[in-house]
Image: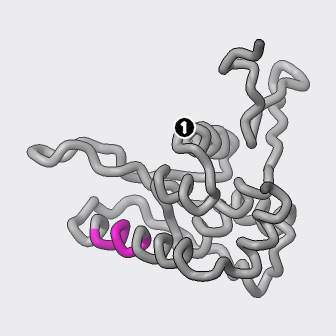
Amino acid sequence: MQSATDETPAIHRRKTTPTRTVLTLTDRATLGLFFIQRYRFLTIDQFARVADLNRNTASNQLRLLELGGFLGHFGNTGRTGHGKTPKAYFLTRKGWELLLREGDIPAELLGSHKEIKVESRWSPQMYHRLRTVDLIVAAREYKQPSAITTRFRAHNP
């Protein structure tokens, strides 16, 4: 019988030396990173939907990618009277280079790296932007999948 800790996640950490960790980038994770690049940032739930992953798996993958320096984040801070803001992840330059090099995505489809300014304050427009991305993701799920989505999902039935 296999316990929950014995399961191999889509992105896993394997120690090769005490100071070095190897990350395995799967097609689903690559697809999620592509959509982070396309929409500039995604929350955990949005990443899970576009990569077709369980929320906990998506959260673990995003955390590992952030620890590796491939992602940055903003949000997840308390606002008086409003609770916490959602945590949104974005690609760092290192993450964009990884996606360009290992993602098997044409450079013209991937586009250039977009620098994210995290110094600005959280505003009501950010909630609107997150909801707009939710609608775009839902529309993509509803209509016929794009060629890139089909290609990635063909490898992960």
Query: What secondary structure is the stretch in magenta mostly built from?
Result: helix
Residue at 86% in and 69% down: 104
Q: Is residue 47 left or right of residue 75?
A: right
Measured as percent of width and height from the top left, residue 59 is found at: 55, 41
Residue visible at 61% across and 68% down in the picture = 35
Question: Residue 8, image x and y in percent?
Answer: 77, 31
Compared with 88, 135 (above or below) is below
Element marked by disc 1: helix
In the image, 113 versus 43, the foreground residue is 43
Residue 128 x, y percent position in the rendering: 28, 71
Where, quadrant-wise, is the C terminus in this rendering?
Answer: bottom right
Residue reaching furthest bottom?
108
Residue lying at the far left in this picture: please name it: 81
> Which residue is tagged 1?
56
- Closer-to-camera residue (17/61): 61
Q: Left or right: where does residue 82 sit relative to residue 119?
A: left
The residue positioned farthest toward the right in the image shown: 16
Magenta residues (range): 128-133
Task: Judge whether 130 appears above or below 64 on screen.
Answer: below
